[in-house]
Amino acid sequence: MSLSPQFGKIVPSQKQELLDSNYLQWTDSATAGTFADFAQQYLPEIYEQEVERYGNRTLSGFLRMVGAEMPMTSDQVIWSEQNRLHIAYDDCAIDNGVGGNTVTIPTAASGLANASADIKNVVSPRSTIVIMDDAGKEIKAYVDTSQTSTGVLAVLPYTAADLQGFATTGKIFVYGSEFLKGSSVGNASDTLGAIGNDGGWISVDPAFQQYSNSPIIIRSKYVVSGSDTAQIGWVEVATEDGTSGYLWYLKAESETRLRFEDNLEMAMVEGEKAAAGSAAIGSANVGVGTQGLFAAISDRGNVNTGFTASAGIDSFDAILKNLDTQGAIEENMLFLQRQTALDFDDMLAQISGGYAGGTAFGLFENSEEMALNLGFSGFRRGSYDFYKTDWKYLNDASTRGAMTGVSSIEGVLIPAGTSTVYDQILGTNIRRPFLHVRYRASQADDRRMKSWLTGSVGGAYTSTLDAMEVNFLSERCLVTQAANNFVLFKGL
């Protein structure tokens, strides 16, 4: 049986049969706009699967690696951190003239023992101190008298007649004391023979630093109309949260949830407290903000600018020397962007015994005959262990990966382990990870990660809205303890 008229050489078949008369060949068309256009328009090849061209797109996971999450019930979290145990002062004025024997402690001196302008002299008579000037000269001395109101110390050097020849500024610290036989601490009538009297002993009370942070409310919402829920289009997916299979209109809801979970972490990393007089704090529509990781390190931690491989190991050793002046936590984590991670690899390769022609052989059982492993996942320098990993948040083009320049964040050094702090709520000393998240929760409501449905579609019947609304909410803040042990790497 044949059909009339026939369209070119193509004869339709009444059955789904593979015949040479009903075969559409794209090259049969001599002119554009015939079979080729017909087939491309009405017979498309559709892929059910999404192409994952950006790989794993989620950015969260950083805080889960280095911290923990704990509930709280208040609008504010307050913690206290210990001050240093020993007494030291920087920027002291040294009387270096002939017969000079005084050292003056500035009331608002910067340095190790001066946390505020309220701290004055707490060095008692009969203390023994080390005096070091800014030129590197030092001498040990005995404190004769000490005026707490002006911070002036009358000192008697052990090995010289005076402080002549010293620079005009320097540092002092107490290393002990020396008393006469039968002397009484704090007795102004107690004589020291020809030296004079002590003028009263100064009691040194323990001090601490108190810090606080406030949680912020983070919200998001996904909306799909009732009409769109009836228009089902299936898509096979394998999402970053482990979901696999077929989704229809809730595909967008799944991504909204992933984006919200990322925002929970990003808000803890990037959070900023509103400063007095700022536009944010003066607006009725904006809260006071919260202090995130970057802001905490910039305010209370260490900032290294322009770390490069060309500077060699000396540049990194300078960071270690600074850590020695702080808590000296033995194990530390390095979360780095790509270029900084490569700089660390190059720096370590240059000091390896197998370094040759720009390539390090013999590292972790490498050899010239085998595939090279040019990356370092961990190393030890001095008394410190470092574990290095890439931080996707600093590499992703949709976040900080596209940022370069002076303000760019290139990595962070975070101490591993826990710290001991005094919890104002519990009234006891507790051990906490240096980084941890506090979220609002009680027996009535847990605000760590809430989600609920509203509207009149998809099983929710709470309003007359012809749509389904998927709501997300969390209330949380980040606690960055002992920030003096953290290092923030910034670009030039």
Image (cartoon, helix red, strand yellow):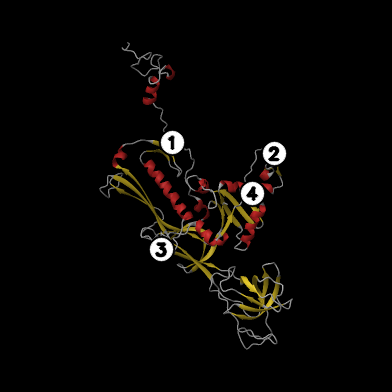
Per the image, the residue denoted by label 2 is: 368
Foreground: disc 2 or disc 4: 4
Q: Residue at x 31, y 36 (%)?
A: 231
Element at badge 1? Answer: loop
Q: Is residue 434 visible in the rendered structure shown here?
A: no
Question: How would you rate the neighbour count of disc 3 (Cα within 10 Å): few for under 14, some for 14-19, many for 20 or more?
Answer: few
Which mark identifies residue 50? 1
Which mark identifies residue 309? 4
- Cα distance between the residues tagged 3 and 2: 60 Å
Q: Residue at x 38, y 19 (%)?
A: 35
- In the image, 140: left or right of 207? right
- In the image, 264: left or right of 341? left
Question: How would you rate the neighbour count of disc 4 (Cα within 10 Å): few for under 14, some for 14-19, many for 20 or more?
Answer: many
100 vs 184, nearest the viewer? 100
- Cα distance between the residues tagged 3 and 1: 43 Å
Which mark identifies residue 75? 3
Where 274 falls versus 470 (above or below)? below
* Quadrant in which the N terminus appears: top left
Q: Is residue 190 visible in the rendered structure shown here?
A: yes
Element at badge 3? Answer: loop
Q: Earlier in the sequence, mark 2 or mark 4?
A: 4
Image-quadrant location for residue 425 = bottom left
Q: Residue at x 48, y 42 (%)?
A: 56
Q: Earlier in the sequence, mark 3 or mark 4?
A: 3
* Mark 1 residue type: Glu
- Cα distance between the residues tagged 2 and 4: 23 Å
Q: Earlier in the sequence, mark 1 or mark 4?
A: 1
Is label 3 in contact with label 4 (beta carbons under 8 Å)? no
- Cα distance between the residues tagged 3 and 4: 45 Å
* Mark 4 residue type: Ala
